[in-house]
Amino acid sequence: MNTKFDLSEMGANIVYLKPMMTADLPDELREQAGGLEQIFAVHNGMGEQVAYIADLKFANHLAQENNVRIVTLH
């Protein structure tokens, strides 16, 4: 529990998913989301938003393809 390690290395293979209500998105993105009520914002290990994704199944697929681990934010 008291083992020291470099936290900066942890972010290299992690993406964060943040659930977002489509009603909170700008009009252009809301139109692209179709009839979905919720989507997920994808953030890299540095906290930068890099994409939006429709569902967790697709997020898991992309994570496996890119050798990253998903962490869900709430």
Image: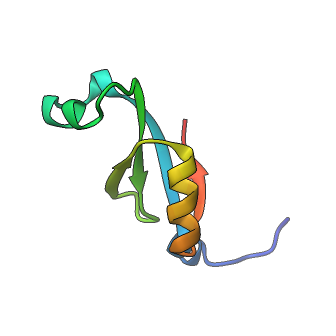
Image x and y of residue 73, in percent: 54, 42
- Residue 47 percent across, percent down from the top left: 40, 57
Task: Write the residue at 40% across / 23% down.
Answer: 37
Q: Nearer the viewer, residue 16 or 55?
A: 55
In the picture, the quarter occupied by the C terminus is top right
Q: In the figure, residue 6 lies in which quadrant?
A: bottom right
Nearest the eye: 57 or 9: 57
Q: Is 14 above or below relative to 34?
A: below
Q: In this view, does 1 lie to the left or right of 19?
A: right
| Residue in the image at 51% along x and 54% along y | 59
Number of marks in the rendered image? 0
Residue 67, by quadrant, is bottom right
Residue ID at (33%, 25%): 35
Q: Give the colouring mode of the picture.
A: rainbow
Residue situated in front as seen by the camera: 33 or 27 = 33
* Location of the N terminus (image quadrant): bottom right
The correct choice, above or below, for 53 with respect to 7 in the image is above
Direction front: furthest residue: 34
Q: In this view, does 71 lie above or below 40?
A: below
Residue 69 location (% of width, % of height): 61, 64
Where residue 24 sits in the image (x, y, percent)? 28, 25
In the picture, measured across the screen, residue 70 lies left or right of residue 45, that is: right
Q: Residue furthest right?
A: 1
* Figure quadrant of residue 9: bottom right
Q: Residue furthest left?
A: 28
Residue depicted at x 80% and y 74%: 3
